[in-house]
Image (cartoon, rainbow, N blue to C red):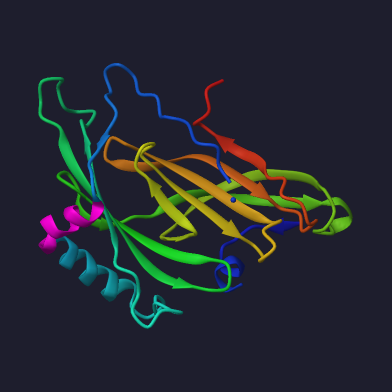
Amino acid sequence: MRRMGLAAVLLAGTVSLAHPVFAEDEPGPEASADAASEAAAQPDLLARARSLYEASRGEECNGLPFDEPPAPDVHTIEFRPGYAGEDDPLEQATLIRFFCRAGAYNEIHVYYLSTQLDGLRELSFAEPELDIRHEDDDSEKPVEEMRIIGFTTRALLVNSDYVAEDFTITSDAKWRGLGDASSTGLWLFRDGNFTLVRYEVDATYDGEINPQVVLDYFTAP
């Protein structure tokens, strides 16, 4: 039996995207343009986010292997909250991604989100806790059973990115450099938060990329 966790991944999956579908009474978000100009237009917010990031993540996020870590990515998302009426103006959320650190094949990021309702906060991302069983208890052999036994959250995402046209954050964590074992997640922005909608795991160190979907609320039936 093997329980999947991120600790080994941080020390050492790929999702097919589609446009999110929203109910007629729940309009989808609309992305804004250039991230650099957005960052320049919100220096105070970016400075406050950086202060939060350095206070909470300064020790574990050392920026390696860069002498000077990459500048944070900033995105503005316009959306209508579920409690708003059709004639109410759109609200604006600001998503900020900080580079934390990187190893040989995994890059770690931390995200902050600012909304009118919740203010500025560090994001945590839901993901399933899995009980993984291989044939003969050998991780190079096929998976006999993989089931969700609960859910947890984490703030550090591996090889992640915000996909503006889909309003999603993706993560593709390699369990080793070959990439034949991995976990991938997809979180969709809706109503001011990012919700886990898809999760795949390739739990076999067999030299092949063959993930299994363990959770899918994103793909149409």
Residue at image coords 56%, 49%: 184
Magenta residue span = 35-44
Q: Residue furthest right?
A: 136
Residue at image coords 29%, 67%: 71
- Residue 90 location (% of width, % of height): 15, 32
Q: Is residue 124 left or right of residue 211?
A: left
Q: How many marks?
A: 0
Q: Is residue 155 left or right of residue 141?
A: left
- Residue 179 location (% of width, % of height): 67, 58
Above or below, 86 relative to 98: above
Above or below, 90 relative to 52: above
Residue 198 within the segment the image draws in magenta: no
- Residue 153 location (% of width, % of height): 45, 54
Above or below, 39 relative to 189: below
The image quarter in which residue 22 lies:
top left
The image quarter in which residue 210 lies:
top right
Q: Is residue 55 left or right of residue 176?
A: left
Instruction: Give the quarter of the figure containing the C terminus.
Output: top right
The image quarter in which residue 37 lies:
bottom left
Residue at image coords 55%, 42%: 15
- Residue 97 location (% of width, % of height): 33, 59
Per the picture, the main secondary structure of the magenta-coloured stretch is: helix
Q: Residue furthest bottom?
A: 67
Residue at image coords 16%, 27%: 84
Q: Nearer the viewer, residue 133 or 89?
A: 89
